[in-house]
Image: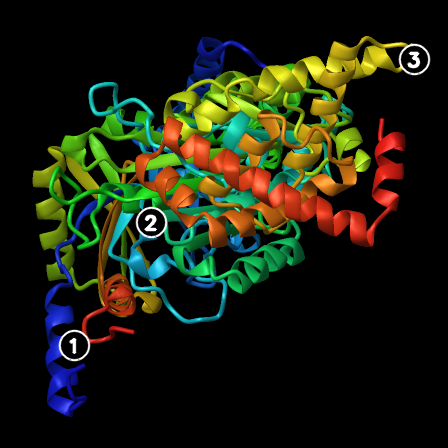
């Protein structure tokens, strides 16, 4: 940084003052006719545009911004952003010719900002590299390419059965307290070192919850590549409404620019981004409030008619761009909270139909101890399969179906006791696979480890283990393979698939470890056999 | 609630024409415009008054009485038209009536009213030059409605037809403040 001298300061100020335009332009002016509930009806402003930013001049000389939403013959219905208490009747309102924009730039990484890009973390102003429109039209078909690259969540159940690709939109849906946010946070933490920029948008949550998320990310070193956009429950409805779009705009900046800050192209790749909207049900509620106070007609569940369009145009911004545009991507993980598992409510069905699949979390599974509480029967990923690495496809190909048939058999087996051998085997395998896929919070697993673990499960190496031994076996196996058969892991990483040779080595390694494991078990825990009897 | 836009338009035009004819007869077109705008501002700013004048529970005569009570000092023609509007439950059209009145007045007289705000009282020479300039720009006669507001510091603000030309020192200073407050030169963190 240059020396601070009087002449330097003088020169800087001069150059900035030169930039001020002294030209006078004519602007349209209207008058506030009525204000209340964060909504203002403004008379005049014949030329206002839909979504245009309006400037309200308050009596104390400050200005408050608003968003023109209803354009009527004689008046404009606007929602107020910011300190709307100050706006009074008869205040004058100017059009600005702009639509709502947020600042964006590299300096936003690691920061917590409000929906308008203002810093909330007390770390001082953020240097913006530019402004982006909050409402940005998603790019078209020609500029895109199919989703082929995986976005690893580090969660075995997701990466194996509901794989997510970069540029995909995968809904996380479930009741309250089923671990929706945990999946999102684990996914962010797993992006460490993978070059994915994450944007976490908190909508209508408690400020303490947001603070906890920030703390978790910071503890795991994930905050450096993450931007938090926060519109808490105490923010006004318009801010909650705009927050996901702001988050998308901030992510778009990274997607459209290369590391050097220049527009992305073939030689200057755009960044991969991940946007988490937590959660869109709250945004829908905020938008409903705005619409009703603007006197727009209510529709189903009192949501306005364009609530589908609101979510579809937001999620359509998720994209995998073609090579000419720098191959950047935006993966969207919207979150929807259901009420008592009711996925047929209005907003859940809408968002399910918009996204490329959903991860469905159930509270009964959660309380049974299946965590993450993913119901694999109704969770799907419509495009992610193409994005899975081949090794994972090889080992997890039949996992979904196996687990689905296990679930149906399990229900059936509750009635009778005499089951034939084949059915018993299937039940055995199923309960061990369920156990294998259990995973703690904040413990994302690299994909090669997942492949090894699932390989052991699907090839029957766990069938004669007691159910409670499955997780210790899995963790021990991964350590063992890394230390004693590192070439196998190396081969999976480098080749991306399991060749016949690797498979042979892997089998040998698993058998060897199993010998060690069983020996240890019989020494320390004779109870293990007893629990295997009662495990079924 | 009224649903027909055409009907609302016709009603507003009828009230505005009645007001204009009364004003033209007494040659107080501009004074009446100012009075109407004052009424409009007062009604907007006073929610209880607005409610009382559009309250379905009150009888027509009660609403009319409210008008004659509150606006007793105004021109009798204004009072009677407003009272009629209140009586017929058309008071929500007020802002349209005022707007329409301005339009009719401009059309019938070929003169546009322009609000001029300055920090000090206009001198005759300055006034003449503003009128000449505005007449040329608008292509019709101009009547200035002058307002002195020291808070704009200097310069001039012109308001007409919902358009504002703001050449005041206050807004230019504000502009400068904004440019300086968001500038980043020399401030890399």
**For the residue carrying disc 1, how many other residues have a C-alpha within 10 Å: few (<14), some (14-19), or many (20+)?**
some
Q: Position of residue A95 (x, y in %)?
A: 32, 42
The chain ID associated with circle 2 is: A
> Mark 3 near mark 1, Cβ–Cβ under 8 Å?
no
How far apart, in angstroms, are the residues tagged by discs 3 and 2? 53 Å
Tag 2's secondary structure?
A: loop
Which of pointers 1 and 2 lies earlier in the amino acid sequence? 1
Of residues B80 and A366, the one nearer the viewer is A366
- The circle drawn on residue A195 is 2
Q: Would residue A397 be seen by someone viewing this image from the given angle?
A: yes
How far apart, in angstroms, are the residues tagged by discs 1 and 2? 38 Å
Residue at mark 3? A417
The residue located at (73%, 37%) in the rendering is A176
Which of pointers 3 and 1 lies earlier in the amino acid sequence? 1
Of residues B76 and A314, the one nearer the viewer is A314
Residue at mark 1? A13
Q: Would residue A43 be seen by someone viewing this image from the given angle?
A: no
């Amino acid at each position: 940084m240059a020396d601070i001298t009087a002449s330097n300061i003088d020169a800087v100020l001069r150059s900035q003052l030169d930039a001020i335009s002294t030209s006078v332009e004519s602007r349209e002016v209207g008058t506030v006719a009525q204000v209340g509930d964060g909504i203002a009806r403004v008379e005049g402003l014949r030329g206002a545009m839909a979504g245009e930013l309006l400037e309200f001049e308050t009596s104390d000389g400050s200005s408050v911004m608003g968003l023109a939403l209803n354009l009527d013959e004689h008046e404009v219905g606007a929602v107020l952003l910011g300190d709307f208490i100050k706006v009074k009747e008869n205040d004058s309102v100017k059009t600005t010719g702009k639509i709502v924009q947020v600042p964006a730039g590299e300096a936003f990484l690691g920061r917590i900002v409000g929906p308008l890009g203002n810093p909330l973390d007390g770390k001082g102003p953020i240097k913006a590299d530019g402004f982006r429109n909050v409402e940005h039209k998603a790019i078209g078909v020609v500029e895109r390419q199919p989703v082929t690259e995986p976005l690893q969540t580090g969660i075995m159940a997701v990466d194996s059965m509901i794989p997510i690709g970069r540029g995909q939109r995968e809904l996380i849906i479930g009741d309250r307290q089923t671990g929706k946010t945990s999946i999102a946070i684990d996914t962010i933490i797993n992006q460490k070192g993978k070059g994915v920029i994450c944007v976490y948008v908190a909508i209508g949550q408690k400020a303490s919850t947001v603070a906890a998320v920030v703390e978790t990310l910071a503890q795991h070193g994930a905050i450096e590549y993450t931007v938090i956009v926060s519109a808490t429950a105490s923010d006004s409805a318009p801010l909650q409404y705009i927050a996901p779009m702001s988050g998308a705009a901030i992510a778009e900046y990274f997607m459209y620019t290369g590391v050097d800050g220049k527009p992305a192209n073939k030689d200057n790749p755009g960044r991969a981004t991940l946007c988490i909207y937590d959660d869109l049900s709250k945004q829908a509620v905020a938008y409903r409030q705005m619409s009703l106070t603007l006197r727009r007609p209510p529709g189903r569940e009192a949501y306005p008619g364009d609530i589908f369009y609101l979510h579809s145009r937001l999620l359509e911004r998720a994209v995998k761009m073609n090579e000419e545009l720098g191959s950047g991507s935006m993966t969207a993980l919207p979150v929807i909270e259901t009420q008592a598992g009711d996925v047929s409510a209005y907003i859940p069905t809408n968002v399910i139909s918009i996204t490329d699949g959903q991860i469905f979390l159930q509270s009964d599974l959660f309380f049974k101890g299946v965590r993450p509480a993913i119901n694999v029967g109704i969770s799907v990923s419509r495009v992610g399969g193409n994005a899975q690495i081949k090794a994972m496809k090889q080992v997890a190909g039949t996992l979904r179906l196996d687990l689905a048939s296990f679930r149906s058999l399990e229900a059936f087996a509750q009635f009778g006791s005499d089951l034939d051998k084949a059915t018993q085997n299937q039940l055995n395998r199923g309960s061990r696979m369920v156990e294998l896929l259990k995973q703690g919070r904040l413990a994302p697993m690299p994909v090669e480890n997942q492949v090894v673990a699932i390989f052991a499960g699907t090839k029957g190496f766990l069938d004669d283990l007691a159910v409670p031994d499955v997780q210790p076996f899995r963790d021990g196996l991964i350590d063992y393979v890394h230390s004693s058969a590192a070439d196998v892991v190396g081969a999976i990483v480098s080749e991306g698939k399991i060749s016949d040779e690797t498979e042979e080595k892997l089998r040998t390694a698993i058998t060897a470890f199993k010998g060690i494991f069983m020996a240890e078990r019989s020494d320390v825990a004779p109870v293990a056999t007893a629990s295997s009897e009662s495990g079924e | 609630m009224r649903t027909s836009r055409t009907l609302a338009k016709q009603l507003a035009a009828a009230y505005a024409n009645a007001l204009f004819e009364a004003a033209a007869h007494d040659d107080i077109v501009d004074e009446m415009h100012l009075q109407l705008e004052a009424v409009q501002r007062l009604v907007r700013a006073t929610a209880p008054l607005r409610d009382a004048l559009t309250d379905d529970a009150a009888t027509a005569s009660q609403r009319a009485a409210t008008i004659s009570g509150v606006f007793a000092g105004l021109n009798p023609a204004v009072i009677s038209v407003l009272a009629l509007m209140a009586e017929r439950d058309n008071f929500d059209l007020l802002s349209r009536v005022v707007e329409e009145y301005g339009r009719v007045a401009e059309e019938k007289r070929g003169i546009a009213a322009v609000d001029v705000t300055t920090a000090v009282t206009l001198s005759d020479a300055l006034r003449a030059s503003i009128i000449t300039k505005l007449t040329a720009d608008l292509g019709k006669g101009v009547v200035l409605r002058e307002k002195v507001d020291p808070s704009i510091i200097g310069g001039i603000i012109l308001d007409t037809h919902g358009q504002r030309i703001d050449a005041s020192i206050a807004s230019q200073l504000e502009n400068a403040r904004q440019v300086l407050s968001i500038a980043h030169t020399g401030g890399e963190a």
